[in-house]
């Protein structure tokens, strides 16, 4: 039996998704593997925080904010991802000292930038185990 804290990755599902990911990769139970990568993404949003606090919250968990590309790949391909298009969510990409990129809000492809001091959704990423 697999460790209770680790969710197994279904190699057939990865192959069907066109992924070339090692079948032994796994993610913590509250995360999902982004197809064709070795990156895990939080299944659910972790609330809303300003960008700096969002990055710190992920770091405190041993994770990080997802890159723009990871977030998009997770939103469009990670089966079981919850509520990714209900609210804007921060990603790690920074536009300037005062603005960062956010994703979501109505569609996986929705993308915008905003002042880092305002609270938006937080979803972390991490390397698969």
Image (cartoon, rainbow, N blue to C red):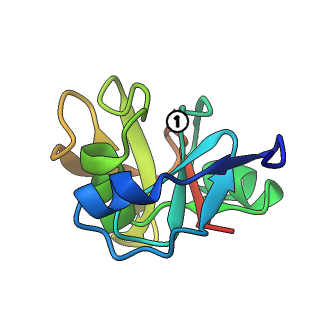
For this view, does 46 lie left or right of residue 56? Answer: left
- Asked if residue 82 lies left or right of residue 51, the reply is left
Compare residues 102 and 40 and report the one nearer the observer. Answer: 40
Judged from the image, the secondary structure of the residue bearing numbered disc 1 is: loop
Q: Position of residue 11 (x, y in %)?
A: 44, 60
Q: Which residue is mark 1?
A: 119
Considering only vertical position in the picture, is 73 above or below 89? Answer: below
Q: Residue at x 25, y 57 (%)?
A: 17
The quarter of the picture where the C terminus appears is: bottom right
Q: Position of residue 108 (x, y in %)?
A: 21, 42
Left or right placement of residue 8 versus residue 75 in this view: right
Note whether 104 is above or below 19 in the view shown: above
- Of residues 93 and 45, which is closer to you in this image? 45
Image position, residue 10 (x, y; %): 48, 52
Task: Name which residue lies at 50% across and 75% down.
Answer: 22
Q: Quadrant location of residue 68? A: bottom left
Note whether residue 35 is visible. yes
Q: Position of residue 14 (x, y in %)?
A: 36, 59
């Amino acid at each position: 039996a697999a460790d209770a804290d680790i969710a197994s990755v279904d190699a057939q599902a990865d192959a069907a998704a066109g992924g070339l990911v090692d079948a032994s990769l796994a993610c913590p139970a509250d995360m999902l593997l982004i197809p064709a990568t070795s990156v895990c993404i939080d299944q659910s949003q972790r609330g809303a925080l300003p960008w700096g606090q969002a990055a710190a919250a992920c770091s405190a968990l041993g994770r990080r904010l997802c890159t723009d590309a990871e977030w998009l790949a997770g939103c469009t391909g990670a089966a079981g991802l919850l509520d990714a298009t209900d609210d804007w969510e921060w990603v790690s990409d920074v536009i300037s000292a005062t603005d960062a990129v956010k994703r979501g809000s109505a569609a996986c492809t929705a993308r915008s930038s905003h002042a880092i001091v305002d609270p938006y959704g937080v979803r972390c990423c991490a390397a698969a185990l």
